[in-house]
Image (cartoon, helix red, strand yellow):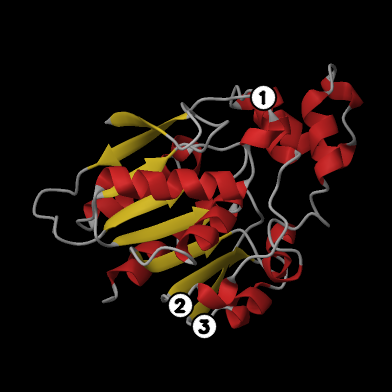
């Protein structure tokens, strides 16, 4: 089921809901999923089987399509973007859901957004962040040493994909494959959050998930150590393939099954 709400600045945000499998415990905190850059709820969470695993284990699940992504509005003004704006969208969603407790899961851009939200809202009682590492601690967000914003923007806005540097070719191909609005993505690329991120305020139990070959999640132990109550799990794969590691979805579900 897809629903929508109007966020703080008039942008329409759409989100998707799934009920637990028969016999599931509707009294457990709802699991809220926030995807990464270029992706959406379907590509980041449905296709790899995360939603299926969670609902099969009796959880209610909500996936938000970030502004500029999926079925949400896609303004082209860079001033409407950044993970700070997305965190406000996320907290607006929690208001709409009316839940006293939520478990929050974010990947890459969504992980930075989730950390920002968890640092300021006590409704988040358990947190999973994937696809990020030391860059969050050292730069405040997605590791721009590996993903330079100027190269991201140039790759997305190039008229001819053949003109995209090899380093960014995969990003451009993926954006085209999912039918993304590349001007909206470029606006986010210009506005990626770069600190400060109040990691010391993220006091809830947290799981850091990182692909062993993911350059955007380099040195994930640095991030886990910077969070007051975090553990680290390393998976097979890089930034795109770690979510398809057979242990990815069960690792999330197992961690969220622990008592708050």
Asked where in the image residue 57 lies, by quadrant, the reply is bottom left
- Choose between 145 and 164: the one closer to the eye: 145
Q: Which residue is mark 2?
A: 203
- Choose between 156 and 194: the one closer to the eye: 194
Q: Nearer the viewer, mark 3 or mark 1?
A: 1
Sequence-first tag of 1 and 2: 1
Q: Which residue is mark 1?
A: 76
Mark 3 Cα within 10 Å, few/some/many (few <14, many 20+)?
Answer: some
Q: Secondary structure at mark 1?
A: loop
Sequence-first tag of 3 and 1: 1
* Depicted 237 relative to depicted 36: above or below: below
- Residue 65 coordinates in the image, percent (x, y): 46, 36
* Depicted 120 relative to depicted 178: above or below: below
Which mark is drawn over residue 228? 3
- Whether tag 3 and tag 2 are in contact, CB under 8 A, the answer is yes
- Residue 241 coordinates in the image, percent (x, y): 60, 51
Number of dots carrying numbers: 3
Mark 1 Cα within 10 Å, few/some/many (few <14, many 20+)?
Answer: some
- Give the spatial CA distance, label 1 vs label 2: 35 Å
Asked where in the image residue 116 lies, by quadrant, the reply is bottom right
Q: Secondary structure at mark 3?
A: loop
Residue 49 visible to the viewer: no
- Residue furthest toward the top? 159
Residue occupying the point 25% across, 41% down = 18
């Amino acid at each position: 089921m897809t629903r929508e709400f109007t966020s703080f600045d008039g942008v329409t945000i759409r989100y998707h809901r799934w009920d637990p499998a028969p016999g599931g415990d509707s009294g457990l905190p709802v699991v809220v999923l926030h995807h990464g850059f270029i992706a959406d709820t379907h590509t980041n969470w449905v296709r790899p089987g995360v939603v299926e695993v969670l609902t099969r284990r009796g959880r209610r699940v909500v996936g938000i399509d970030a502004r500029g992504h999926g079925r949400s509005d896609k303004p082209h003004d860079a001033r409407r973007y950044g993970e700070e704006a997305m965190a406000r969208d996320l907290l607006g969603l929690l208001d709409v859901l009316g839940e006293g407790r939520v478990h929050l899961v974010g990947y890459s851009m969504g992980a930075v957004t989730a950390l920002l939200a968890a640092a300021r809202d006590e409704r988040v009682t358990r947190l999973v962040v994937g696809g990020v590492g030391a860059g969050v601690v050292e730069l405040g967000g997605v590791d721009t040493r590996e993903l330079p914003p100027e190269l991201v923007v140039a790759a997305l806005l190039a008229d001819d994909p053949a003109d995209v540097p090899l380093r960014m070719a995969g990003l451009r191909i993926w954006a085209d494959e999912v039918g993304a609005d590349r001007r909206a993505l470029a606006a986010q690329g210009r506005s990626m959050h770069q600190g400060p991120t109040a990691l010391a305020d993220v006091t809830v139990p947290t799981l850091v998930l990182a692909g062993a070959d993911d350059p955007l999640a380099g040195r994930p132990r640095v991030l886990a150590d910077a969070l007051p109550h975090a553990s680290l799990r390393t998976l097979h794969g890089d930034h795109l393939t770690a979510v398809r590691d057979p242990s990815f979805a069960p690792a999330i579900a197992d961690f969220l099954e622990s008592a708050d």
